Image (spheres, helix red, strand yellow):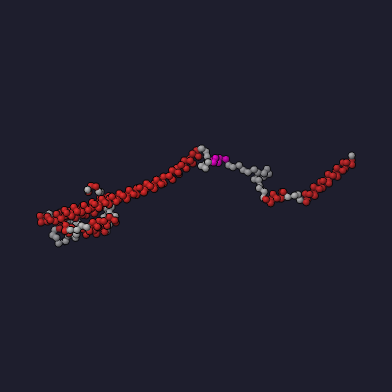
């Protein structure tokens, strides 16, 4: 069962730390009493032999301090605690302690593997959901990218055919200038409404008088010619 779960790949999050705390609370019975507190300094030769002591309350403190990074870190402290117990209690009088240690170790391994497998399954479900969400977002964005690619392709073809992207002919020749007057080559001036009205108005009195004078002169000339005849 242990080979099915890689404890190093499972991080101890805040939610997981609470579950580990519940696991510790559930470790009850006389076989766990051996491991609740730190071994007393009065036990002869214990700290001469055991250089890295470990007990349940210290493990709980480390969980609360967020000292554990992965499940493997937690398991190593439990394994250390059981190993210390077996290392120190080797004589025949301590056989019952070794039996309690074996019972406690088996119970811990069962609970710990169950918790790790549950956490791993939850992690896989979250990872699967995140991947599905990313794939869905990608499929929604695909039509937009396709439309953009089609538009770019159309612009490239238009340029290759000598057209502007909007379908018009390329502006190779500048627009011809407006026709100019022969005098100064300036663009023809558009007449305003007032100027057009002046052009359409009847001739002035001065022009009329000149017209009458011209008519009288023509009549006098005609009479002179008739008299000569």
Q: Nearer the viewer, residue 9 or 20?
A: 20
In the displayed structure image, the side of residue 52 where residue 179 appears, left or right:
right
Classify residue 166 as left or right of residue 3: right
Q: Is residue 80 shown to the viewer in this render?
A: no
Can you name the residue that lies furthest to the left here? 92
Which quadrant of the figure contains the C terminus?
A: top right
Give the image location of residue 9, x and y in percent: 27, 50
Q: Is residue 171 magenta?
A: yes
Q: Residue at x 47, y 43 (%)?
A: 151
Please say whether residue 90 is one of the residues in the magenta stretch. Answer: no
Toward which corner of the image does residue 46 lie, by quadrant?
Answer: bottom left
Query: Residue at coordinates 67% horizontally, 44% vertically from top-left?
Result: 181
Provide residue 65's location: percent of width, then percent of height: 27, 59
Where is residue 116 drawn, in percent x and y?
25, 51
The residue most toward the top is: 161
Q: Residue at x 67, y 50 (%)?
A: 192
Q: Is residue 136 visible?
A: yes
SS majority, magenta: loop
What span is colored magenta in the figure?
168-173
Spot occupied by residue 66 in the image (x, y as percentages of width and height): 27, 57
When asked about the image quadrant of residue 142, the answer is: top left
């Amino acid at each position: 069962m242990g080979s099915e779960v890689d404890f190093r790949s499972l991080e101890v999050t805040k939610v997981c730390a609470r579950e580990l705390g519940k696991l510790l609370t559930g470790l009850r019975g006389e076989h766990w009493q051996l491991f609740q507190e730190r071994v007393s300094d009065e036990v002869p030769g214990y700290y001469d032999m055991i250089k890295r002591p470990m007990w349940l309350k210290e493990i709980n403190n480390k969980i609360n301090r967020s000292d554990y990074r992965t499940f493997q870190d937690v398991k190593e402290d439990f394994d250390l605690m059981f190993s210390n117990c077996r290392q120190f209690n080797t004589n025949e009088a301590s056989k019952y302690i070794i039996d309690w240690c074996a019972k406690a170790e088996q119970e811990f391994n069962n609970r710990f593997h169950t918790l790790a497998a549950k956490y791993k399954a939850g992690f896989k479900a979250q990872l699967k959901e995140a991947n599905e969400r990313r794939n869905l977002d990608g499929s929604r964005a695909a039509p937009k990218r396709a439309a953009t690619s089609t538009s770019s392709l159309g612009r490239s073809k238009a340029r290759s055919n000598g057209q502007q992207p909007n379908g018009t002919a390329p502006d190779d020749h500048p627009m011809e200038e407006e026709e100019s007057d022969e005098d100064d080559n300036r663009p023809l001036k558009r007449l305003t409404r007032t100027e057009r009205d002046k052009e359409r108005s009847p001739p002035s009195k001065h022009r009329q008088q000149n017209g009458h004078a011209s008519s009288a002169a023509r009549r006098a000339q005609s009479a002179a010619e008739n008299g000569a005849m």
